[in-house]
């Protein structure tokens, strides 16, 4: 695991956006990107559609997926889709067929998870992962104060799921959620955790130490793995 520490919020957004843009320009053909929810990645998404990045990014070849979603309508303020749409996708020349949100209306959480698994398999072109051919080119993930990432929360049965590509998570939070599972998220050529704010300092220390109680510590992506952090969260972790 590499850790990349920025001095402030602006530097953090720029470093992550530069990393994403560089990988996107290196990718050949269509490629998949996993988007993290929450507020930490918002400035990164906004940076990618700023004038310095928007005209350089290969929007026509990028396919956008979500690591997880709250089971609420897409126009709900809690929706991860809405955050990414408002911050980035609605401001970019993205073909509509390249946006792959999780369904959350007129469907059960379990049906939504199965539906997303079919979507992922269609994009991948196979029903089983090949370590030599990652599903995603880039995966962006957050780190919760309890060590969860995506919607893989401590103590949940989904932590042991090794066959399904997506699963419903019921009872971990007030609203049901849909999450990608470990095997799906681990099938990424380049993965980054985005961690910012002093409130995440303690969990980042535990994560870097490999605390086995944390769902994030069990994450073993097949490709490059790094953490982008700001100085507020890094502190003594910066070395």
Image (cartoon, rainbow, N blue to C red):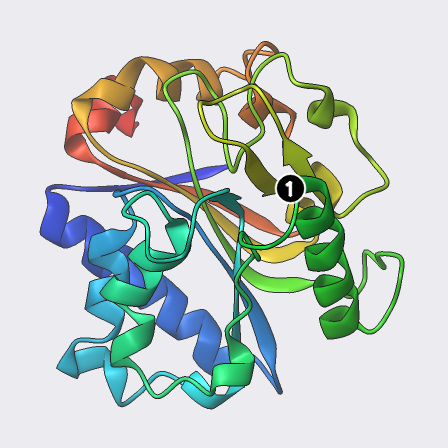
Residue 229, percent across and down? 28, 38
**Along the line of sight, the residue nearer the viewer: 106 or 113:** 106
Q: Quadrant of residue 105?
A: bottom right
Q: Left or right: 201 with respect to 193? A: left
The residue located at (66%, 44%) in the rendering is 108
Q: Which residue is mark 1?
A: 109
Tell me the quarter of the image containing the C terminus: top left
Rate crowding at label 1 as few (under 14), some (14 to 19) or many (20 or more) other CA atoms within 10 Å. many
The mark tally for this picture is 1
Q: Left or right: 218 with respect to 80? A: right
The residue located at (76%, 51%) in the rendering is 114
The residue located at (44%, 23%) in the rendering is 174
Is residue 185 in sight in this rendering? yes
Q: Quadrant of residue 146?
A: top left
Badge 1 marks a residue whose secondary structure is: helix
The residue located at (33%, 57%) in the rendering is 75
Residue 200, percent across and down? 28, 22
Examine the rendered structure and indicate whether residue 196 appears above or below residue 159: below
């Amino acid at each position: 695991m590499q850790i990349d520490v920025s001095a402030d919020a602006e530097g953090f957004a720029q470093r992550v956006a530069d990393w994403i843009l560089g990988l996107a320009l290196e990718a050949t053909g269509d490629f998949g990107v996993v988007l993290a929810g929450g507020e930490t990645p918002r400035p990164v998404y906004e940076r990618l559609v700023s004038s310095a990045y928007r005209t350089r990014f290969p929007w026509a070849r990028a396919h956008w997926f979500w690591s997880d979603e709250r089971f609420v309508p897409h126009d709900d303020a809690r929706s991860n889709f809405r955050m990414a749409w408002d911050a980035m996708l609605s401001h970019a020349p993205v073909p509509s067929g390249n946006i792959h949100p999780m369904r959350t209306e007129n469907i059960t959480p379990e049906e939504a998870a199965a539906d997303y698994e079919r979507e992922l398999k269609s994009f991948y072109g196979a029903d089983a992962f090949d370590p030599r051919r990652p599903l995603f080119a880039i995966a962006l993930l957050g780190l919760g104060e309890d060590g969860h990432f995506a919607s893989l929360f401590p103590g949940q049965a989904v932590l042991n799921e090794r066959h399904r590509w997506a699963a419903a998570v019921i009872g971990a939070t007030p609203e049901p959620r849909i999450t990608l599972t470990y095997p799906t998220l681990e099938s990424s050529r380049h993965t980054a955790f985005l961690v910012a704010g002093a409130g995440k300092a303690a969990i980042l220390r535990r994560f870097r130490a490999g605390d086995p109680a944390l769902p994030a510590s069990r994450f073993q992506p097949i490709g490059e793995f790094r953490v982008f952090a700001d100085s507020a969260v890094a502190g003594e972790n910066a070395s």
